[in-house]
Amino acid sequence: MDLPDFSEAAAARLREQVQDRIQPSNPLDTGGSWADPTKPLVYPLTLETFGAEPDFDVIISRFTVPRTGSLGSIGERLEEMEAARQSFPDKLFAVLARTSDQFSDEWAQAVRERRIAFLQGYGRGLRALGRLGEYSRKVHGGSRAPGAIPASTPPRPTGRTLSEIDSKTLLAAAGIPVVKTVAVATADGAAHEAERLGFPVVLKVIAPEIVHKSDAGGVALGLQDGTAVRQAFADLRGVAHAAGANFEGVAVQSMARPGLEIVLGTHRAAQFGPVLLFGLGGIFVEVLRDVALRVAPLGREDARAMLDEIQGAALLSGLRGQAPVDREAIVQALLRLSALMLSRPDIASIDINPALAYPDGLLAVDARVELTD
Ligand code: ADP
Ligand code: MG
């Protein structure tokens, strides 16, 4: 973070109003405690002087926040800060405190209600603001100020979950390649669709209660002919019944050729908006949590950096004579997920687990979209 100097005019104005009580500099020490009788004059004046400086984007107040009990005079300072925010709505007014372990409920409630950026710990707090500036410049370009924190839309992930097929249809419409999948309710229907798609095929149970299909034995891979398809249909119906789930049929899909399993995902976070996730499938994501995360909107360079960032990045380049995967296809899919989340506020999360990455392109074989309610 840069700490620019005051303009000469601002320094002169401060000097004139507060005489020798404070030294007009950046950072500025207002002297005494927050309960000091001079504060109702000095603090608003200081905030206003900083706010009026065209080159200042962020005005940080270093408070000693109450560890327990009521706000006391800090409450008045917060009112004064609120007034300054109203006067300078394009500036970010933040509170920095050394307290990083404990603060009173009253304080927590006050900053939450007023939507004040409360930074705990000097080093971490300033780094966070530096990152915010960096992010803002990237998103808005040029030298625009970070501005106020956007009103958070709390994610409501309790909403409706789309079926695998509806999820894939939505993704396909957004330009993300998905494996051909159709729903059928009978064994005859399954055999017929398998014939149409061409063998080998995959059958997956459709039952609203079964979310992790393979854990329940609800995925039959590599079915080579009609007999195998009919048998699998009967097996999957058995799986649903054994689990006490409502059997609604099966999803018949082409068996995708082998590729590198990757995971692409996104969810709407309360404070950041849509967050994008990339990782390698299987144990890499489930056990090692080897994933890269970014806040939307994603730029092409961000998406490329995500691919390089994971521990298992070498696998993308092809190990032991394997061909490298098509990185740009993955980048493209991440960009499309980012755009989709921005254009569809009714989507709470998307989970593509897995997609198969190839030397040429990629294919999503499982997908789940959750809507807000
Ligand atoms: P779930 O995640 O609900 O257990 P999936 O649909 O992801 O079920 O299927 C489990 C695994 O089966 C996938 O991780 C993938 O390895 C494989 N798989 C699923 N669908 C296909 C397909 N169409 N082609 C090839 N492999 C598939
Ligand atoms: Mg899956």
Image (tube, grey):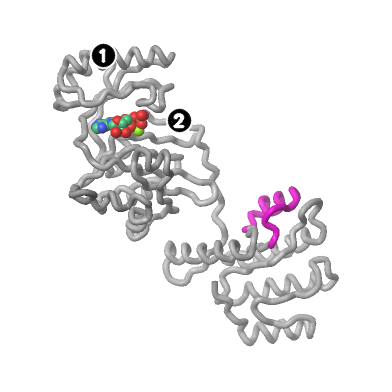
Q: Label 1 is placed on what type of residue? A: Thr
Q: Earlier in the sequence, mark 2 or mark 1?
A: 2
- Is residue 310 left or right of 54 when viewed as pictured? left
- Crowd class of label 2 (few under 14; some 14 to 19; many from 20; radius 10 Å): some
Indicate the position of residue 109 as horizontal and vertical percent values: 71, 49
- Is residue 265 left or right of 76 when viewed as pictured? left
Can residue 164 be seen here?
no
User: Looking at the image, which residue is at 52% across and 41% down?
Assistant: 155
Q: Which residue is mark 2?
A: 160
Q: Secondary structure at mark 2?
A: loop
Q: Are marks 2 and 1 in contact (CB under 8 Å)?
A: no
User: Looking at the image, which residue is at 47% across and 63% down?
Assistant: 136
User: Looking at the image, which residue is at 54% across and 71% down?
Assistant: 1
Q: Which residue is mark 1?
A: 186
* Residue numbers of the magenta segment: 98-117
- Magenta stretch encompasses residue 103: yes
